């Protein structure tokens, strides 16, 4: 476990986050390295573009463990209010991570708002990814990083066939 240092700009970025998934007996665990990768791209400046990528890790009976976050990639579609991974780059990363033993677990991207909320476009993206994915889990996850430091700035959603459901981080 990483040693935490309190820095007002970094919040508690060094700390893994845990979120119980209702009805499954599993928790989503966002490990500190993946969390730091995502938080590095928070849109703290007014003109910053959204960033994003894919989430990778391991699934056990008790955990859906997010170990690594990839992206953004050259060729992505990035604007202040939109992000879409370049599909070839994302697929190559999925294969590269699979070769090192990590499963594709979902997607992350940033929003230019303090406490992020999934947009209707995010819901549509989740549905189409669900249809197109070769599934290795019961659910995929989406993490949206807003500007607020600490866990409140990171929105976690699980998505399955028809829905995108907000999941709360556990208080530490
Ligand atoms: Zn979004």
Image (cartoon, helix red, strand yellow):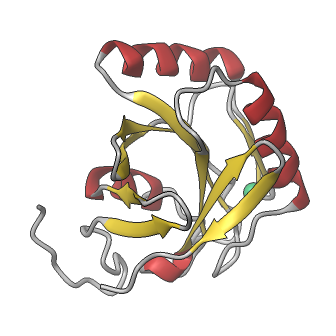
Point 46% across, 54% down: residue: 38
Check the picture and name the quadrant holding the C terminus. Answer: bottom left
Along the line of sight, the residue nearer the viewer: 79 or 135: 135
Left or right: where does residue 103 sit relative to residue 75?
A: left
The image shows residue 87 at horizontal and vertical percentages of 70, 21
The image shows residue 28 at horizontal and vertical percentages of 43, 58
Write down the quadrant of residue 4 in the picture: bottom left
The image shows residue 51 at horizontal and vertical percentages of 62, 48
Point 53% across, 27% down: residue: 136
Q: Is residue 72 positioned above or below 170 on the image?
A: above
Q: Quadrant of ligand 1?
A: bottom right
Q: Is residue 157 positioned above or below 154 on the image?
A: above
Point 46% across, 36% down: residue: 70
Left or right: where does residue 171 sit relative to residue 94?
A: left
The image shows residue 47 at horizontal and vertical percentages of 71, 64
Point 73% across, 72% down: residue: 117
Check the picture and name the quadrant holding the N terminus. Answer: bottom left
Left or right: where does residue 172 sit relative to residue 119?
A: left
């Amino acid at each position: 476990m990483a040693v935490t240092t309190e820095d007002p700009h970094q919040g508690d970025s060094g700390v893994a986050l845990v979120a119980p998934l209702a009805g499954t007996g599993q928790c989503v665990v966002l490990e500190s390295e993946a969390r730091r990768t995502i938080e590095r791209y928070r849109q703290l400046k007014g003109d910053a573009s959204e960033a994003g990528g894919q989430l990778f890790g391991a699934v056990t009976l008790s955990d859906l463990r997010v170990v690594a976050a990839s992206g953004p990639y050259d060729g992505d579609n990035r604007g202040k209010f939109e992000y879409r991974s370049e599909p070839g780059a994302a697929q190559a990363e999925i294969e590269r991570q699979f070769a090192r033993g990590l499963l594709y677990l979902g997607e992350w991207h940033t929003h230019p708002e303090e406490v992020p909320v999934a947009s209707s476009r995010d819901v549509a993206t989740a549905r189409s990814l669900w249809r197109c994915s070769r599934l290795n889990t019961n659910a995929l996850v989406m993490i949206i990083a807003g500007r607020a430091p600490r866990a409140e700035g990171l929105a976690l959603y699980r998505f399955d066939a028809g829905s995108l459901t907000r999941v709360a981080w556990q208080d530490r």
